[in-house]
Image (spheres, helix red, strand yellow):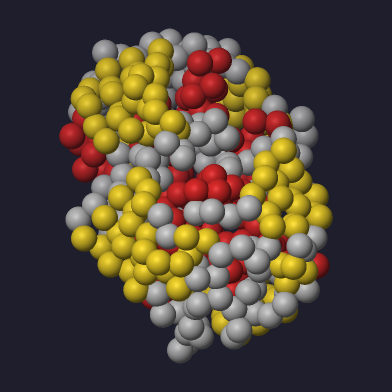
Amino acid sequence: MKPLTIHPADKLTGRLVLPGDKSISHRAVMIGAVSNGKTVAKDILDCDDCNYTIGAFREMGIEIKKEGAYTTIEGKGLRGLKKPKGVLSVGNSGTSMRLIPGILAGQDFSATLQGYESLSARPMKRITEPLSAMGIDIKSASGYPPLTIKGGKVRAINYRMPIPSAQVKSTILFAGLYAGGVTVVEEAFKSRDHTERMLGHFGAKINVNGLKVSVEGGKELEGRQLEVPGDISSASFFIAGAVLLKGSSLRIEKVGINPTRAGILKILAGMGARVKIANKKDLFEPVGDIEVESGKIRGISIDETVIPGIIDELPMIFVLASLSKGRTVIKGAEELKVKETDRIKSMKENLEAMGAKIRIEKSGIIIDGVAELKGADLKSYGDHRTCMAMTIAALAAKGPSRIDDVESVTKSFPGFFEVMEGLK
Ligand code: S3P
């Protein structure tokens, strides 16, 4: 496909509801599949990654129907999955690759999860180590996909996670559902807690005590109804666009504002952006309407404790920092190197091509704001978030840009460009 030309935009205005949260959508399908009875989920995200999770559970005998905004999952109980006929393909979805093994741990068959080449470069030792410690037979290709899991007996463990990761925490909690006894996971800094919340909603015996989460094994889950909030990570692109483009005013309704996930809102407040939350509701996941207006922003110091809460928004924060007044310092963001691409490299190279000032030092990433960015030839590196963040940078630049591989956005947000056009 030819690169897409992006012309600078005047402003972003309007009122919109964004597609459902990717992390919550994956979990609704996974947890619904191993609950007893029907789960009806409204607004599950229709994107490549979530559709791979749906495909994998269909391969394991779970009936999943989509009708309009509603997805019905006919759960078969904790150990009710069927051995798939072939390898389970999860495309480019790291969340499927890392979370499904926790569920396979408790089934009475062996199955292999495989992804595209790009996913095969993503580290899996972070899950094979704790799952092996739980007595699970899990094999990888020297720490990388494919993964083969032979379900069986699961041992409860106490595990302190060496890296903050919601995916690692979640797969251990899923395996813990099958263990005899209580499994405890402890993290150094809080990562998104969607799994804990949803397991609680479906009747698991789960307990959260600060940075420790415990789950009691052996308790069956019950199918539920739920509504998936709009994805804050998708929202962050348009929020940033509205902050940067003079005269913008946006209202994004029903967005998930779970505090373990919506760190971007605190960062924006710290940068002096004009962002407000209205209409807050606390369902099993808190939601609200985000109102944003353009305005000047300043640099900010971001330390490692808040990184898990903004991990997917950091590409967008690189762009905001580049167009803010003063210096931004980001510490402890090394996990960005093992996302769909090395996002420190992809963002630095792209933004530097536009005239940004970014240095990578031992102490962290240092971004000195510039008065303006200029249009340039930009690369997605096959990464949806690099692509969307750079598209917003291009809207705010002087002169047109061209960006390659725009199909990468279908991983999490197939309608990204159409929504963007509608706001111009
Ligand atoms: C996710 C957790 C994060 C995030 C990813 C989705 C999840 O990854 O980057 O997009 O749904 O649990 P890590 O757990 O590796 O930090």
* Up-down relation of residue 251 to residue 4 (above or below): above
Residue at 34 percent of width and 14 percent of height: 294
The answer to whether residue 249 is visible is yes
Q: Position of residue 134 (x, y in %)?
A: 77, 68
Q: Is residue 83 left or right of residue 131?
A: left
Based on the displayed image, in which of its 4 quarters is residue 253 positioned?
top left
Residue found at the very far bottom of the displayed protein: 85
Q: Is residue 17 left or right of residue 274?
A: left
* Quarter occupied by the N terminus: bottom left
Q: Position of residue 136 (x, y in %)?
A: 73, 74
Q: Nearer the viewer, residue 246 or 153?
A: 153
Give the mark count.
0
Q: Is residue 139 left or right of residue 405?
A: right
The answer to whether residue 382 is visible is no
Q: Nearer the viewer, residue 64 or 52?
A: 64
* Quarter occupied by the C terminus: top left
Based on the displayed image, in which of its 4 quarters is residue 220 positioned?
bottom right
Residue at 36 percent of width and 64 percent of height: 38
Residue at 46 percent of width and 44 percent of height: 386
Q: Position of residue 417 (x, y in %)?
A: 26, 43
Q: Position of residue 325 (x, y in %)?
A: 52, 12
* Up-down relation of residue 342 to residue 128 (above or below): above
Residue at 54 percent of width and 21 percent of height: 266
